[in-house]
Image: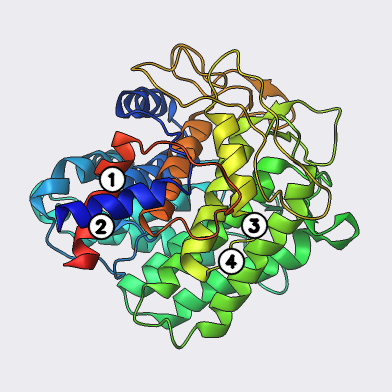
């Protein structure tokens, strides 16, 4: 049996490139994420990245059922501990304000961003953390839900504002609010709330999709000030990733059959964004900060997040159009310093194979990687607090590269479906074998 499994592993890795981050490098990237995450959406995005990477059984991106088990297996107690710490600290701080009734999980100028923490809070409640620390996680999540529908302004057709000070829609909000609504709906067996997650995405798409620009999404619409008609790359990636989370939540839930048409729409809408964005990828494997504006700087954050959704779409809906290109992009993001990266690009279809000369990411630090600083920060990145400016450190970018790593790992474990047969073989990576082996043993036994 062991020899048979080993043979399958070798066959699998002859079809995909073994380039990946070493565990020590993942630890450094995770440490920078923990260090930098101090805002509402950063807490939420960090929690979701940690679930995907370290506790996939409790992530909506896994092949496991939603809701997950109440009882936590001992082998992932530590991994979930980081997520529960985020939820704990947020609910403690909320309790100290002595405010009752509808309220966001954390005070913010954004009406939508605090909801991103809701999945972690709901999970803490689901697994009984309140019985351990005495906190009312269920009440905190319910107040966040009530805040969205009772306090937040909305359009005449029901699209919830992303801002507190004015009625305004941001593409970012698709990642923040709908995944919380979907998870809340499934855990509380409330199909109305689950359906609302889909409805919010549909409404945001109605307002932000720019058909004249090949279906790229505009960044910010409505409101008295601050509109952004540009096609912000991270905004398009936020939208695709939010859709993916809702799709995964529905698909693994008891309501999957009842929401089949919604699942089809979500998958098609993610693929629609891929089709709009990837004609704008550059030969270095990166998007410009504004996808169709070459006067803006290169950005690895959006590049990483969008690539992660390609692998997830393959796993969730068997749509693999952009898998070969995502593989090239992932390799470019993990290229060694001094490497000449050349990604095959086209304005109409994804590349069938790679011309990248990127080397395998190895070592115990990120100092030898082209797109990481020696301290472990992804670079170059957009300033997460000023979307038109280049930044030096992006907590959300750290989360995105971890989500890319987790998505690729899961895609490989599923058989690397959609990888081009024309790709040249590379030797099997030990870290890859460690990750894939348990999955193969379960399937074969």
**Which residue carries the number 3 mark?**
161
**Which residue carries the number 2 mark?**
439
Disc 2 to disc 4: CB gap under 8 Å: no
Instruction: Answer left or right for 150 relative to 155.
Output: left
Q: Earlier in the sequence, mark 2 or mark 4?
A: 4
Confirm whether residue 423 shows in the render. Answer: yes
Colour convention of the picture: rainbow
Q: Which mark is residue 319?
A: 4
Q: In 3D space, how far apart are the residues under numbered discs 3 and 4 (Cα atoms)?
A: 31 Å
In the picture as drawn, the residue positioned furthest to the bottom comes out as 258
Q: Earlier in the sequence, mark 3 or mark 1?
A: 3
* Label 1: how many Cα within 10 Å (few below 14, some 14–19, many 20+): some
Q: Which mark is residue 415?
A: none
Question: Regarding mark 1 in the picture, which secondary structure is present there?
Answer: helix
Q: Give residue 297's position: percent from left, percent from top.
A: 76, 25
Q: Earlier in the sequence, mark 4 or mark 1?
A: 4
**Residue 305 location, quadrant:** top right
Disc 2 to disc 1: CB gap under 8 Å: yes
Q: In 3D space, how far apart are the residues under numbered discs 4 and 1 (Cα atoms)?
A: 23 Å
At x 64% / y 55%, what residue is drawn? 322
**Which residue carries the number 1 mark?**
435
Instruction: Answer left or right for 277 relative to 300.
Output: right
* Label 3: how many Cα within 10 Å (few below 14, some 14–19, many 20+): many
Q: In 3D space, how far apart are the residues under numbered discs 3 and 1 (Cα atoms)?
A: 41 Å
Task: Give the foreground label among 3 and 1.
Answer: 1
């Amino acid at each position: 049996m062991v020899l048979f499994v080993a043979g399958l592993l070798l066959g699998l890795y002859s079809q995909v490139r073994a380039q990946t981050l070493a565990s020590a490098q993942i630890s450094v990237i995770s440490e920078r994420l923990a260090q930098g995450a101090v805002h509402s959406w950063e807490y939420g995005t960090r929690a979701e990245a940690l679930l995907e990477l370290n506790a996939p059984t409790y992530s909506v991106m896994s092949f496991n059922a939603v809701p997950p088990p109440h009882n936590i297996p001992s082998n992932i107690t530590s991994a979930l501990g980081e997520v529960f710490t985020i939820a704990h600290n947020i609910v403690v701080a909320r309790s100290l304000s002595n405010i009752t009734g509808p309220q966001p999980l954390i005070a913010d100028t954004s009406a939508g961003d605090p909801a991103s923490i809701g999945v972690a809070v709901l999970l803490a409640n689901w697994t009984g953390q309140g019985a351990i620390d005495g906190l009312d996680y269920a009440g905190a999540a319910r107040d966040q839900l009530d805040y969205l529908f009772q306090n937040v302004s909305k359009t005449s057709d029901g699209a919830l504002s992303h801002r507190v000070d004015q009625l305004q829609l941001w593409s970012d909000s698709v990642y923040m609010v709908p995944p919380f609504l979907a998870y809340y709906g499934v855990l509380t067996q409330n199909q109305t709330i689950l359906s609302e997650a889909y409805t919010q995405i549909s409404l945001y798409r109605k307002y932000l999709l720019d058909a004249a620009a090949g279906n790229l999404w505009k960044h910010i619409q409505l409101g008295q000030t601050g509109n952004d008609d540009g096609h912000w790359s991270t905004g398009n990636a936020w939208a695709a990733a939010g859709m993916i989370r809702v799709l995964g939540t529905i698909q693994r839930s008891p309501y999957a059959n009842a929401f089949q048409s919604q699942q089809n729409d979500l998958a098609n809408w993610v693929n629609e964004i891929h089709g709009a964005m990837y004609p704008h990828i550059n030969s270095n494997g990166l998007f410009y900060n504004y996808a169709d504006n070459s006067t803006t700087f290169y950005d690895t954050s959006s590049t990483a997040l969008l690539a992660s959704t390609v692998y997830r779409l393959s796993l969730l809906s068997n749509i693999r159009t952009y898998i070969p290109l995502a593989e090239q992009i992932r390799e470019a993001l993990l290229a060694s310093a001094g490497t000449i990266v050349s990604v095959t690009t086209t304005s109409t279809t994804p590349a069938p194979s790679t011309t990248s000369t990127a080397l395998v990411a190895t070592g115990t630090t990120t100092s030898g990687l082209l797109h990481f600083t020696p301290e472990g920060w992804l670079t170059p990145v957009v300033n997460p607090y000023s979307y038109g400016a280049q930044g030096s450190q992006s907590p959300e970018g750290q989360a995105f590269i971890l989500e890319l790593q987790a998505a690729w790992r899961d895609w490989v474990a599923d058989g690397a479906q959609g990888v081009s047969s024309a790709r040249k073989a590379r030797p099997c990576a030990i870290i890859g074998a460690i990750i894939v082996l348990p999955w193969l043993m379960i399937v074969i036994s």
